[in-house]
Image (cartoon, grey):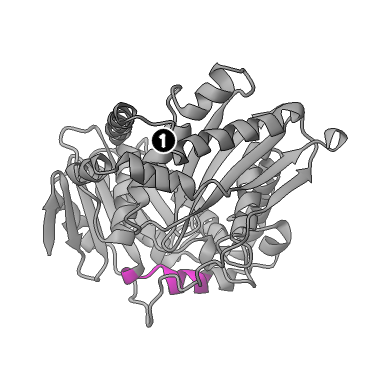
Amino acid sequence: MRSHTSDISYHSLPCGMRMVHVHSRGAATAIAGITARVGSRDDGPEAHGIAHMVEHNIFKGTERRSSWHIINRMEAVGGELNAFTTKEETVVYSIYPAGNTARAAELIADLVQNSQFPQRELDKERQVIADEIDSYLDSPADAVYDDFDDLLFAGSSLGHNILGSKADIGKITSEQCRAYLRQHYTADNMVAFYSGPEAPARVLATFATRFNPPQSPSASTSTAAQPPHTPPFHVRRSIDSHQDHNIIGARLPGMFSPERHCFALLTNILGGPGMNSLLNVALRERRGLVYSVEASCAWYTDCGAFTVYYGCDHDDSSRCRRLIEQCIARVADGNALTPRAVEMAKRQYLGQLVVAADNRENRILSVARSTLFCGRAAEAAETESRIRAVTADDLRHAALSLTQASTLTLGPDALA
């Protein structure tokens, strides 16, 4: 089975696993891997951090390879082996000089099908993850996002930290990791992907001979309940830091919502990467209150989150918050965006998407994720059409839903 979208083609391997191929003719490198529909949301209350623990230790030994052989397999030809875990997805992939696809596919298939999680390696990696947890705690600009999620999605598996806690990871066993791999890394729960110069037929044949994961006996995709709605909260927590680290945010609809493109455009207008974003102009350019202020959206299958982060002196926190709330209110009132401003914002956002798509690694990971959750990636023309269809009134209504936002501040005790 095969279908085409520009340079993207979709396939099914004999084992029933889906595959997406992006043909990058003339590229000197290739990118190949798998994405599995499993993340920290699927950890279960008894094993917080296991999705991330499995991702870390999937490189530590298979039935026929030691960790040393695994890390050297792609590095021997100048390639890299990477992995990461999110709330709903785990990705294992390699970037390598073109011509080594058979090597990469065979290795990644071995990892996701035959990893053994040796106890000795598991014990060593616990300390590595403990250090990773400490590094997040030492970086309040990162930790504040996790703490905010815990509050916004309180009472659900979506809220807890991807890394888990030191106590959580200290209890995870090799057998739990092997069982987790068998349950979630199944043909119907994974998508293979490739971006590079090799033609689809050749890559498909290469993957077909190497991947044969089991089908799950029952649906293995996340069945976690949708997080309950929490009332707006305003929380301050004391930490040892030189400045306040602040999040203002609200819950959004999920990745399948027809409102997604409107919220994405609104987020870019408010605090996207451009220096002309409303919040950057209001807080930094005009008043010099912050080094940076950024808005972002996180999209999950059944809900999402809008956040604005800014770090500033404690004495400026309340003022910055009022300015952010005023910016959002001005959009909600219809006073911030003229028709010309909306069209300029669309042009800027669409241009940013073109620039982002030029990064092959980011693009294939995005295409693979869209294939995993939506069955395919949206064509550029389709995305452009949806963005251009957003009206000033749509943006106003979207902003209105953000006016009752929640807040979290991590800051020093002495100034509290």
The prevailing secondary structure element of the residues shown in magenta is helix
Whether residue 305 sits left or right of residue 240 in the image: it is left
The quadrant of the picture occupied by the C terminus is top right
**Can you identify the residue that label 1 sits on?**
268
Disc 1 marks a residue whose amino acid type is Asn
Quick check: 180 above or below 366?
below
The quadrant of the picture occupied by the N terminus is bottom left
Residue drawn at point x = 51 percent, y = 74 percent: 179
Residue nearer the viewer, 149 or 79: 149
Numbered label tally: 1
Whether residue 234 sits left or right of residue 278 in the image: it is right
| Residues drawn in magenta | 178-188
Residue drawn at point x = 50 percent, y = 57 percent: 87
Whether residue 377 sits left or right of residue 269 in the image: it is left
Residue nearer the viewer, 309 or 31: 309
Residue 259 visible in the current orientation: yes
